[in-house]
Structures are given as structure tokens and as C-alpha cells.
């Protein structure tokens, strides 16, 4: 039972991550490989603030989001001047820079040693120290994020995003500010990505840079792509699938190291397959309607 | 003196890597992440053949370059070519190559585990003394082979039919098809040459500093950074890119700390993407003009 709850909590964390990337990569067509960096910024902010200054969750969460947002704003001002493959390379570079800051700034992040002893999450004196209450909290947060993202993507702003991902120059010609829209989207995506970071830090109570590598970014991106670029529900299902997969592999009887490799092989292979059939697997099975591919 | 030698050797390695990548990127115009795995596989095939099958080293090197090249061509033919026929965008191709990279890298991890492997059988020697600095035999091999290859690539691109076709295709693929140059075939040639270069680079590097399954990715990115700094479109620009990158990395390692090397590398990349997206050579690329 504990084990099941543990997996469910991880699923909610990845759902938030994937859905925030759906906004950036799916609707905004900015294939970003720096999402794990923002996830890490969220985790480190809350860890440092709650250990060193004893700040409660309700203060560290908005602070983490704001810090992640500010960093994303600065990054997007730079990165969004490039497009397509240069943008991917640029965000990849940013991810590596963020990782190397987490890994090397010893005085702040304790580098590869990580930060242990992050206190349990508490709101108004109520401690979320057992798994069930934590799961309920993370489900509530996930649904809030889902609700916000759904409304954003259905709003006028979302329509502008879809338009610019189809044809940037045309969108600009009808008087929309493409650059500003992209910056807002990127920043918003990064702010939302800080939420699961905060949850993760409080839940595991120990963080180190190895959770926020390039591979993690690629993993989040593949959840989005397998779920169908512009599909929030698809991202949800794909997150469930990809988080449960290694556990299933372990049950089948692979050893831990091989199971990790096989999981990566499966999601790498599904990226290739999805690109051959632009309609994603999950969309094919579950949503039998026509969806836009990303091209 | 030692630091100058080190800068010199790394810039030649980056030049080597950038060459191999450039020759694929130039005509086909997309970043194949799967190129990283060719670098790694070159090294691992050599390890397999020379240490596990016990062939002599030079046979192992030759046959693993051939094998890795064949794999590169196979990937191009079976995966990228059909995708390109469907007219999918560059981003789709890039994501596909990323997926392929993940798959193949993990296959290597399963076969050879994540531990560091070494082709060398003898003890590490101090090397030869050269103007007060030390240089190993492997590094001498790296210097000689990368210079030879760089010059032959220059000549190849300028004077052979395929080299000229690569130039032509990179400037306008459709027009080339009209004039009877088969762009797909030329891309295949370019992939073959690029893969062979990548595999050779991987082998030389693994002889120098050992290997892990993930080594290709970083090396590929160094090559890419050198290429972008140098400016996509000129081979001579690659020299500037490689030298600048190597100098920056070694000075960082010397004056600050070697752990910040990666961060500095990508900082340079981002500065260049902003300040001089066309690189040293100044050739125009359509992508960065918006």
C-alpha cells in the first residue's frame, strides 16, 4: 500500500511537469530541454529556504515559483531569439548550465552531496508526514494546475499560441506580439514546473543534482510527445504509463540497473515511433478524433 | 607550456569532432543527436574487438570504423530518409534522433555496463618530453591524424565531385535535384564520411581518456559548439571555433576550476548564438534571421 501511494505521488509530480511542458512545447512550439532545470530550481529554493530560514510551505511555494519565473524570464529573453533547432540546442545548453550550478556551487547547494533533512510539508501547523495526506495534497495541486492550464489553452491567449505555433509571421501580421507571447508562455511554464520541485523536495526530504539532469528533461519531453503534443489528458496518461513502466519491469524480474535501461529504451523507441506516426499512440488508442501534429 | 600543448590537443580533437558533425549537418540541415552514439560506438567496437576478441589493435580500429560507419548509413537510410520524404519538420527529425540516441546508448549500457572501460593494456606512460611539457604517444597520434584528416577534408570539399555537390545541396537542395544531383545520395555520402570521422575521433579519444557509454553526447555537443562558434558554412571557421572553445575550457580549468568547464562552454555557445549567430565566418543562415 505504501509502495502504491509512493508511485501515485510520483505520477502526480510528473503530471504537473508534463502538463506545464505541454503549454510550452505543445501550444507554444518551443521544444525546451531545460524543464528539469526549473524543476530543480523549485526543489532547491524550497530546500534552502525551509532549512536555513524555517519558512513554511505556503511561503516557499510562491517564492520558488517566482524565482523560477525570474530565471526563466531572463533565459527566455535570450533563448527566444533563436528558433527551431538552435532553440533546442540553446535550451540544452541552459539545462547543462543550471545543472552545473546545482552541482558545483558548493556553498549554496552542497554540490553532489545534496541537501538532506528537508522538513515535512506543513500548512497551518498540520503536518503532511504520512503518504495519504501528501497524496491528497499533491492531487489537489495537480487538479488546480490542470484547471489553470486548461483555461489558459482554451482562452484567447491559447488561441494566439496555437496560431503562432502554426505560422509565426502570419500571427505577427495580424497584430499579435509573438515575442511577448512566447516569453510569457515560457515563464509561465517554468513557474508551474517549480511546483513539482517543491513537492518532490518535501516528499523525499533529500535532494541532489542527479535528479535534475538532461536525461530528466528528455524524459519529461518524451512524456509530452508520447501523450500528444497539445493534449493535457494525453500527457496525464503518458505520465502514468512512463512512471509505472519501470515498476512493472521490476516485477517481471529485471534487475534494477537493466530495468532503468529498458525503460529508457522503451521511451526512446516510442519517440521514434511517434515521429513516424504523427498521431500519438495514446491519441490513437483513446481519442479517436483528429488531432494536430506538431509539424 | 603544458597548457599550450593541452589547448592545442583539445582544439584538434574538437576540430575533428566538428568536422565530422559539420559534414552531416551542412547538407542535411538538421542536428542528428544520434551522431553522438557513432562516436561512442567507435570506441566500444574497438574495445570489443581488441580486448574481448583479442584482435590486433589496428585491425580492431579499422573494422570498428567500418562497422560504425555502416551503422550511421543504416540509420540515415532506414530512419531519416523515409521521415524526410514525409516532409516532417526539422524538429521532428531532431526528436527522432534524440530518441534513437537514448535507445542505442542504453543498449550499450546493457552490453558493457556503465563502468569506465579502457582499451589500453599497458600502463599509462609519462610520455615524451617536448619543450618542457609532456605528451603521450596517443596524443601524438591524435595530432597527426586530425591534421591529416582536416587537410584532406578541405581538399575533398573543394576539389571532388561529391564535395562540390555537398556545397551545392546545402545552398539549394531542390535546384540540385533539378540539375540531376541526387540530394538524398549526397546526404548519404556525407553521413558515411561524417560517421567514419566520428568513429575515428571516438577511438582516439578513448585511447587517450577511456570511455563510458555517455561520452558521445558531451563530445558531440563540444563539436556542435565549435561549429556554431566557427560559423556553419565554412570549414576554416571550424578552426577558430575549436581553438576558441579549447582555450576557454583550459583557461577555465586552470584559473577557476575544471568543474565549471561545461558551464563556460555553453555560456560561450549562448553568447555566440545571441551576439554573432552567424559565427566567425559570417555566412548567412536562414534560421536565425527572424
Image (cartoon, coloured by chain):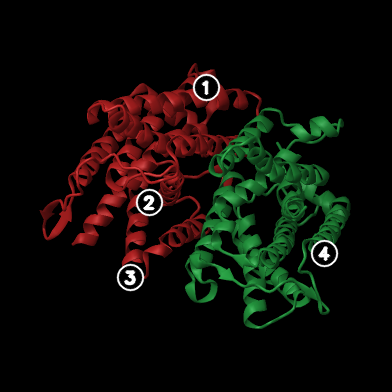
Chain colours: A green, B red
**Label 4 neighbourhood size at 10 Å, few (<14), some (14-19), many (20+)?**
few
Where is residue A14? Give x, y as percent. 72, 52
Can you identify the residue that label 4 sits on?
A133
Among the 4 quarters of the image, the one containing residue A195: bottom right
Q: Secondary structure at mark 3?
A: helix
- Subunit ID for the residue under disc 2: B
Q: Are marks 2 and 1 on the same chain?
A: yes
Residue A127 visible (yes or no): yes
Based on the displayed image, in which of its 4 quarters is residue B163 positioned? top left
Q: CA distance from mark 3 to mark 4?
A: 50 Å
Contact, CB < 8 Å: mark 1 with mark 4?
A: no
Q: Residues within 10 Å of mark 3 (few under 14, many from 20)?
A: few
- Circle 1 packing at 10 Å, graded few (<14), some (14-19), many (20+), is some
**Same chain for marks 3 and 2?**
yes
Q: Chain of mark 3?
A: B
Q: Does residue B101 appear to the left or right of A15 in the view shown?
A: left
Which residue corresponds to the image point at 18% horizontal and 62% vertical from the top-left?
B1
Question: What is the spatial separation of the Cα atoms under label 1 and label 4, in whole angstroms?
Answer: 53 Å
Q: Earlier in the sequence, mark 2 or mark 1?
A: 1
> Residue B241 has which mark?
2
Residue A63 percent coordinates (x, y): 71, 74
State the residue lying farthest toward the bottom.
A53
Residue behind mark 1: B77
Quadrant in the rendering for residue B213: top left
Amino acid at each position: 500500500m505504501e509502495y502504491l501511494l509512493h508511485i501515485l505521488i510520483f505520477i502526480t509530480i510528473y503530471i504537473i511537469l508534463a502538463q506545464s511542458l505541454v503549454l510550452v512545447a505543445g501550444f507554444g512550439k518551443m521544444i525546451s530541454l531545460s524543464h528539469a532545470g526549473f524543476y530543480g530550481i523549485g526543489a532547491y529554493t524550497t530546500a534552502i529556504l525551509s532549512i536555513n530560514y524555517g519558512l513554511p510551505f505556503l511561503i516557499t511555494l510562491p517564492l520558488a515559483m517566482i524565482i523560477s519565473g525570474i530565471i526563466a524570464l531572463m533565459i527566455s529573453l535570450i533563448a527566444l531569439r533563436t528558433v527551431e533547432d538552435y532553440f533546442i540546442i540553446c535550451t540544452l545548453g541552459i539545462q547543462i548550465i543550471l545543472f552545473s550550478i546545482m552541482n558545483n556551487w558548493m556553498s549554496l547547494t552542497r554540490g553532489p552531496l545534496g541537501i538532506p533533512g528537508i522538513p515535512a510539508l506543513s500548512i497551518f501547523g498540520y503536518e503532511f508526514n504520512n503518504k495519504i495526506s501528501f497524496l491528497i495534497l499533491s492531487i489537489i495541486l495537480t487538479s488546480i494546475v490542470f484547471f489553470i492550464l486548461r483555461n489558459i489553452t482554451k482562452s484567447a491567449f491559447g488561441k494566439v499560441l496555437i496560431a503562432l505555433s502554426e505560422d509565426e509571421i502570419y500571427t505577427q501580421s495580424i497584430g499579435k506580439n509573438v515575442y511577448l507571447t512566447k516569453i510569457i508562455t515560457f515563464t509561465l511554464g517554468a513557474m508551474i514546473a517549480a511546483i513539482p520541485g517543491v513537492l518532490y523536495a518535501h516528499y523525499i526530504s533529500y535532494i541532489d543534482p542527479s535528479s535534475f539532469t538532461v536525461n530528466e528533461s528528455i524524459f519529461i519531453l518524451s512524456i509530452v510527445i508520447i501523450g500528444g503534443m497539445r493534449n493535457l489528458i494525453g500527457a496525464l496518461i503518458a505520465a502514468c504509463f512512463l512512471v509505472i513502466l519501470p515498476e512493472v519491469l521490476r516485477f517481471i524480474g529485471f534487475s534494477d540497473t537493466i530495468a532503468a535501461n529498458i525503460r529508457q529504451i522503451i521511451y526512446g523507441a516510442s519517440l521514434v515511433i511517434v515521429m513516424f506516426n504523427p498521431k500519438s499512440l495514446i491519441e490513437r488508442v483513446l481519442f479517436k478524433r483528429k488531432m494536430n501534429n506538431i509539424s | 607550456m603544458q597548457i599550450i600543448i593541452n589547448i592545442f590537443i583539445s582544439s584538434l580533437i574538437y576540430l575533428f569532432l566538428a568536422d565530422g558533425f559539420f559534414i552531416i549537418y551542412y547538407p542535411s540541415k538538421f542536428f542528428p543527436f544520434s551522431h553522438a552514439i557513432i562516436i561512442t560506438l567507435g570506441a566500444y567496437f574497438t574495445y570489443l574487438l581488441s580486448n574481448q576478441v583479442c584482435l590486433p589493435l589496428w585491425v580492431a580500429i579499422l573494422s570498428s570504423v567500418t562497422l560504425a560507419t555502416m551503422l550511421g548509413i543504416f540509420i540515415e537510410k532506414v530512419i531519416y530518409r523515409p521521415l524526410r520524404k514525409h516532409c516532417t519538420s526539422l524538429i521532428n527529425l531532431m526528436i527522432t534522433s534524440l530518441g534513437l540516441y537514448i535507445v542505442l546508448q542504453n543498449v550499450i549500457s546493457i552490453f558493457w555496463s556503465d563502468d569506465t572501460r579502457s582499451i589500453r593494456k599497458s600502463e599509462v606512460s609519462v610520455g615524451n618530453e617536448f619543450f618542457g611539457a609532456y605528451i603521450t604517444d596517443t596524443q601524438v597520434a591524435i595530432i597527426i591524424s586530425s591534421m591529416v584528416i582536416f587537410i584532406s577534408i578541405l581538399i575533398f570539399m573543394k576539389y571532388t565531385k561529391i564535395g562540390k555537390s555537398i556545397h551545392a545541396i546545402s545552398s539549394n537542395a531542390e535546384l540540385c535535384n533539378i540539375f540531376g544531383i541526387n540530394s538524398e545520395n549526397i546526404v548519404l555520402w556525407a553521413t558515411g564520411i561524417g560517421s567514419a570521422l566520428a568513429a575515428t575521433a571516438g577511438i582516439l579519444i578513448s585511447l587517450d581518456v577511456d570511455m563510458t557509454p555517455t561520452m558521445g553526447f558531451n563530445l558531440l555537443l563540444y563539436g556542435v559548439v565549435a561549429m556554431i562558434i566557427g560559423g556553419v558554412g565554412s570549414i576554416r571557421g571550424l578552426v577558430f571555433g575549436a581553438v576558441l572553445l579549447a582555450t576557454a575550457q583550459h583557461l577555465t580549468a586552470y584559473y577557476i576550476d575544471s568543474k565549471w568547464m561545461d558551464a563556460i562552454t555553453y555560456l560561450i555557445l549562448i553568447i555566440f548564438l545571441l551576439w554573432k549567430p552567424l559565427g566567425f565566418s559570417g555566412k548567412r543562415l536562414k534560421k536565425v534571421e527572424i
